[in-house]
Image (cartoon, grey):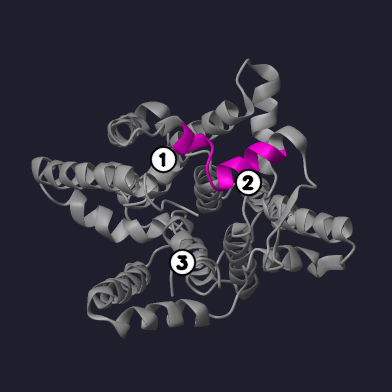
């Protein structure tokens, strides 16, 4: 069993002043990543700005912001890539910023992502600080910043926006702000398909809370109506967009699944991913990559188990579990899986608490070394295959 309430640190308000060390450290890590990207790109006669704003999904989001929905590409093999696959909140915000400022649509999308990454860092700090204390909160934020694919946090992608909404929704659940939690979960559902993870976390927490009251384990709550309203609000964003896509395509509630199928995305329980990993063991050089993948997946599972054993609050465990299942068991392109795992930030909490127990100089050396490696890797990765 896990607790819904904090057990380690007394409640603390996540003020900007309290979060300042985490945010400054996060900004420094991201600045190091962007500088590395600029230097590496210049050496290869490429534009770092183009890599951040005008490749892969960034182009699709920019097109939605500028022209709306209805654009699609038909490939020679018959696949149809429709921009209906991209949820609307990021392009909506980019369009709003474009209307209020002289920024281009691409610049506005990048600005939304950069601001969202700071909001995400603050939200991660707020959750970790409430559960484990300030030092662990700072370490959790820095660990999120130095992830190997952390450069995506600085791209005009929706991962940063989604993580910000997820983190603050989970914080609202932990502090009993049910309407806020439901509203943020609804917005998360307008950002990415994995918004269902936040909805599941809010609903699980709410149902368990009602159940504990009915069983007498908790005193009857005086704020039943706000809690019920929060649960009602949570799924509206995702459900609303999926139903709208179904109406737009004329294929009903399952129309969005057809849109994703056009991109060869779906849920197969991990079959395609397993075949991909097994295929790596057909030759000696690629077998090392296959072994690394197996070790990586095992590490993710172990970190989730560590969260369970550390009695992380149930909403965090549910959110993380759903993100893991959707990322690892979807039939999407393998190269996208590392970035799809970025919102599973509670996986970092066991590592953050371990770092927080070290002397400050040691933890700084560890994080500094990893930050340099992450910056170099991100620059190399984005100048190569990068995110799909």
Q: Position of residue 169 (x, y in %)?
A: 56, 49
Residue 1 as seen in the image, left or right of residue 198: left
> Where, by quadrant of the figure, is residue 368 drawn?
top left
The residue that disc 1 covers is 121
The residue that disc 2 covers is 184
Identify the secondary structure beneath mark 3: helix
Q: Is residue 54 magenta?
A: yes
Using the image as rendered, state which of residue 101 and residue 378 is in the foreground.
378
Q: Is residue 51 above or below residue 336?
A: above
Q: Nearer the viewer, mark 3 or mark 2?
A: 3
Identify the secondary structure beneath mark 1: helix
Using the image as rendered, state which of residue 148 and residue 190 is in the foreground.
148
Q: Is residue 240 above or below residue 291?
A: above
Total marks in image? 3
Q: Position of residue 96 (x, y in %)?
A: 69, 27
Of mark 2 and mark 1, the one earlier in the sequence is 1
**Which of the labelled discs sits on residue 5, or is there none?**
none
Q: Residue at x 53, y 32 (%)?
A: 110
> Where, by quadrant of the figure, is residue 90 drawn?
top right
The residue that disc 3 covers is 334
Q: Residue at x 42, y 36 (%)?
A: 14
Identify the secondary structure beneath mark 2: helix
For disc 3, the neighbor class at 10 Å (few under 14, some 14 to 19, many from 20) is some
Q: Which residues are magenta?
A: 50-64
Q: Nearer the viewer, mark 2 or mark 1?
A: 1
Q: CA distance from mark 2 to mark 1?
A: 16 Å
Q: Nearer the viewer, mark 1 or mark 3?
A: 3
Q: Is residue 326 magenta?
A: no
Q: Is residue 233 visible?
A: no
Q: Residue at x 37, y 83 (%)?
A: 278
């Amino acid at each position: 069993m896990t607790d819904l309430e904090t057990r380690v640190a007394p409640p603390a308000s996540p003020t900007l002043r309290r979060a300042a060390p985490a945010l400054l450290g996060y900004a420094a890590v991201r600045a190091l990543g962007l500088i590395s990207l600029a230097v590496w790109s210049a050496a290869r006669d490429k534009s770092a700005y183009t890599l951040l704003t005008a490749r892969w999904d960034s182009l699709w989001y920019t097109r939605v912001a500028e022209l709306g929905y209805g654009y699609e590409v038909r490939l020679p093999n018959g696949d149809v890539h429709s921009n209906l696959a991209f949820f609307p909140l990021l392009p909506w915000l980019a369009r709003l910023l474009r209307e209020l400022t002289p920024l281009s649509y691409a610049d506005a999308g990048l600005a939304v992502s950069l601001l969202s990454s700071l909001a995400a860092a603050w939200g991660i700090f707020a959750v970790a600080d409430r559960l484990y204390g300030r030092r662990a909160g700072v370490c959790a934020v820095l660990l999120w910043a130095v992830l190997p694919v952390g450069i995506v946090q600085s791209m005009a992608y929706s991962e940063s926006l989604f993580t910000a909404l997820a983190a603050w929704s989970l914080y609202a659940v932990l502090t009993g702000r049910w309407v806020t939690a439901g509203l943020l979960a609804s917005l998360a559902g307008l950002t990415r398909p994995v918004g269902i993870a936040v909805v599941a976390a809010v609903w699980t927490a709410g149902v368990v809370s009602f159940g504990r009251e009915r069983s007498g384990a908790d005193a009857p709550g005086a704020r039943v109506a706000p809690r019920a309203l929060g649960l009602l609000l949570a799924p509206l964003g995702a459900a609303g967009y999926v139903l709208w896509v179904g109406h737009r395509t004329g294929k009903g509630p399952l129309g969005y699944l057809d849109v994703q199928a056009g991109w060869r995305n779906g849920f197969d329980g991990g079959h395609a991913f397993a075949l991909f990993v097994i295929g790596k063991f057909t030759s000696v050089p690629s077998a090392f990559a296959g072994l690394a993948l197996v070790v990586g997946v095992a590490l993710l599972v172990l970190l989730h188990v560590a969260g369970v054993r550390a009695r992380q609050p149930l909403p965090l465990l549910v959110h993380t579990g759903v993100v893991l299942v959707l990322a690892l068991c979807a039939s999407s392109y393998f190269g996208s899986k590392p970035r799809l795992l970025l919102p599973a930030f509670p996986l970092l909490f066991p590592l953050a608490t371990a770092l927080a127990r070290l002397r400050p100089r040691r933890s700084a050396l560890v994080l500094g070394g990893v930050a340099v490696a992450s910056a170099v890797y991100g620059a190399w990765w984005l100048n190569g295959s990068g995110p799909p």
